[in-house]
Amino acid sequence: MQSAISHRVLLEPRSLADALRMLRDEGPLVPMAGCTDLYVALNFGTLKDTRFLNLWRLAPLRTIAARGDALSIGALATYTDIIRSPLVRARLPMLVDAAREIGAAQIQNRGTIGGNVANASPAGDTLPVLLATDASVVLRSAGAARRVPFTSFYTGYRRSVMRPDELVVALEIPAVRGRQFFRKVGTRAAQAISKVVMAAVDPGTAQRRADAAPPRIALGSIAPTVVRLPRTERALSQGASIAEAQETLLREITPIDDMRSTAEYRRRVAANLLARFWIGRDRG
């Protein structure tokens, strides 16, 4: 059953400063932009919030730019913006791969990377990419700005360190050196919520040593938040066989059974994706 909208309030800021002031002085407010999740809740009658802040018109938050060696992606950049961006295609092709896996063209035209981050779903397809690349979340309030490492942004299922008076305004990704890898496994090849999603970076060290830079591996849809696999990363960097690394991974993750998949299936798929990632390094 659709929720009634007559009792809901929508504020329309004209600038980022205006939006931050409204969050501070007129909250609590729920920020909204592409609304690809919010409208689903509205349609199913599960949307309890009544006061909203429409960010969609704040064009400066769509900027994608190079900041020195880092790539800065505005929170309102849509998946279509990301797919079409020469900068993203050149510097972070696995984020383009992730954006292409999200819904159909309609969703890609409306959905934003900032919404994916703020929504905090462990099934968010862009989140493992951001985690594997050591990205930072740029948060702004009316009085201050701060950068939070993606590795410490989430505190639990759909929970983060972002305060009610803050907005995600950008994602900053340092230069990524090495081979990038992204795979999503879902019920269908497209337009499906992921059962398991993996993003990884192999720095491409020719000779593996104890002090070599390890690969960076992140998984989504297997825990309350997206997760990194430091023990698996370390095992691979120290020369473990793929079978040994898979055993380490299986000890490192604790997926659950839910309506989309079983824990055992997720464990098996995660191990297979690890093998595909690592064996791929020998193919250049």
Image (cartoon, rainbow, N blue to C red):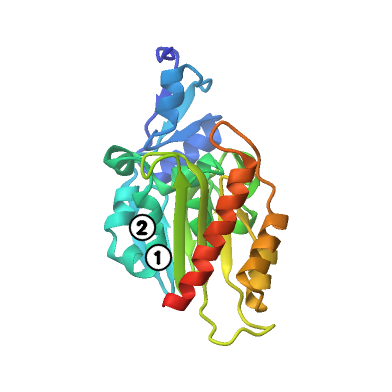
For mark 1, what is the residue?
92
Which quarter shows the N terminus? top left
Who's the residue at 44% across and 39% down the image? Answer: 187
Q: Residue at x 56, y 40 (%)?
A: 165
Looking at the picture, which amino acid does disc 1 mark?
Leu
Examine the rendering and report whether any part of residue 236 can be seen. Answer: yes
Other residues around mark 1 within 10 Å, as few (<14) / some (14–19) / many (≥20): many
- Which residue is identified by label 2? 96
Q: In the image shown, does 86 or 105 lie closer to the viewer?
A: 105
Disc 1 secondary structure class:
loop
Q: Position of residue 244 (x, y in %)?
A: 68, 68
Work out how far the residue at label 2 is from the one at label 1, CA to CA, in angstroms: 7 Å
Q: Is residue 144 above or below residue 188?
A: below
Whether residue 147 is visible to the viewer of this picture, yes or no, is no
Residue 35 in picture, x, y percent from top left? 39, 33
- Residue 85 picture quarter: bottom left
Using the image, determine if residue 163 lies above or below residue 43: below
